[in-house]
Amino acid sequence: MDHILRLKCVICGGEYGADEVLYVCPKHGDEGILDVLYDYDLIATRLTKEGLARNHDYSIWRYAPLLPIAEESPRPPLHIGWTPLYHAQRLAEKLGPRHLYLKDDGRNPTASFKDRASAVGVVKAQELGYQIITAASTGNAASSLAGLAASVGLESIIFVPERAPKAKVAQLLIFGARVMMVKGTYDQAFDLCLEAAREYGWYSRNTAYNPYLSEGKKTAALELCEQLEWEAPDRIFVSVGDGCIIGGLWKGLRDLRALGFIERIPQLVGVQAEGSAPLVRAWEEGTEEIVPLVPDTLADSIAVGNPRDGVKALRAVRESGGQYVAVKDEEIMEAMRLLGREAAIFAEPAGAAGFAGLLKLVREGEIDFEERIAVLVTGSGLKDVDSAIRAVGEPELIEATMDALSRQLTRRSGP
Ligand SMILES: [Zn+2]
């Protein structure tokens, strides 16, 4: 792995060799998240736009020279990444912005964005010779890890909060994970998982702890720009929970600029649910001091009271010249309906939250309709059917007769 220079602590700037530390800055413990520093001159000899244009591997591995894995490491057999980017014309006409792109990451193998990170996590676990890999998750990272672990024959032990949606728990069990359902919040499950990994020597796939996961997440930004023929959009909207996805996108965009693949960096817009918006609060107060809170939102994947990657997430938005936005659960449900009805994308609440943020800024007159806007949809609605039904209402129940049908057809339909 000659393309990795150092690992750098986001708090003190201390640098370490990749073989010196496993997860975090020894001086700063669990808070000392490390960023991977690359040798871009070397990478530029291995990864070029022309090479990519000839590369028929349409998955995250097309960017392997920019990933923290050894060239010879075996990769999971599942198809990760290169998810569709739709030019959402009908939605654009309805809303106003003329160049609206939706990237549907619900199309990954376990139906969420998190597969990008889990794929890298599983490769690292195998490089380091671990048999058991663990994570705490609000749901998607867990089901993703369980799926990726199953694909290569690793054992997975997963910690989820009690309120994780049933479909995600079902995924875990189907993929053969050992599931510890923690009586408490995600934040409590996270702490327990870290302690368990230390105690039992399991490999930790925890976001904002393991430095390599956001490297997997950055592939969404790489793809997005390549799919737009290296003309980066003006703004990217994405939902934010722990902050690791937006931090990863920022990393990917900086990589591309360092390599000269894109000229300017898009503004990142981080969208949180109002009931779980510690980063919006810190943003508005202009501080990196994040005050934890008890989350309350239907968007379980971003129901995070203590964002583990908060500092990176705040800096990503600040340095890109973007902003944070909070949206109400009702606005998230409206976004779910619009995505479904106007673009046929079935998003889970957190998956639709980024789009809800765009809706809000359009209504506030903050969007120039000539801007090129990309919205990341981070997870499939099939993962949380109860919230979907809440957003759209129940079907119309009728007797099996034409009379009953014709009576019903004259009534107004639901939301
Ligand atoms: Zn440090």
Image (tube, grey):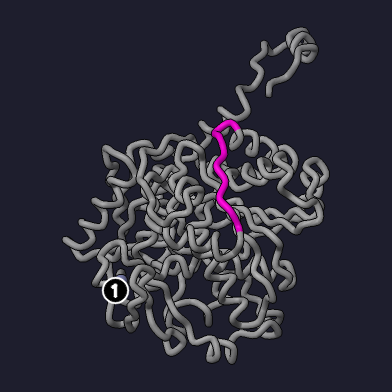
**Residue 326 covered by magenta stretch:** yes
Quarter the N terminus occupies = bottom left
Image coordinates for residue 247, horizontal then vertical, percent: 49, 63
| Residue in front for this viewpoint, 76 or 294 | 294
- Mark 1 Cα-neighbour bin, 10 Å: few <14, some 14–19, many ≥20: some
| Residue in front for this viewpoint, 8 or 212 | 8
**Residue drawn at x 21%, y 56% as measured from the top left:** 196
Task: Give the residue at mark 1.
Answer: 22
Taking 76 as reference, is 235 left or right? Answer: right
Quarter the C terminus occupies = top right
Taking 121 as reference, is 364 left or right? Answer: right
Image coordinates for residue 66, horizontal then vertical, percent: 52, 79
Taking 383 as reference, is 146 left or right? Answer: left
Asked whether the viewer can see residue 145, the reply is no
Furthest-left residue in this view: 199
Q: Which residues are magenta?
A: 322-330
**Residue drawn at x 43%, y 66% as measured from the top left:** 213
143, above or below 72, in the image: above
Q: Quadrant of residue 132?
A: bottom left
Image coordinates for residue 87, horizontal then vertical, percent: 76, 55
Q: Looking at the picture, which amino acid does disc 1 mark?
A: Leu
The number of discs equals 1
Ligand 1 location (quadrant): bottom left
358, above or below 41, in the image: above
**Residue drawn at x 73%, y 9% as measured from the top left:** 404
Taking 276 as reference, is 294 left or right? Answer: left
Asked whether the viewer can see residue 222, the reply is yes
| Residue in front for this viewpoint, 407 or 317 | 317
**Residue drawn at x 71%, y 73% as measured from the top left:** 230
Q: Quadrant of residue 55?
A: bottom right
Image coordinates for residue 389, horizontal then vertical, percent: 57, 29
**Residue 277 covered by magenta stretch:** no
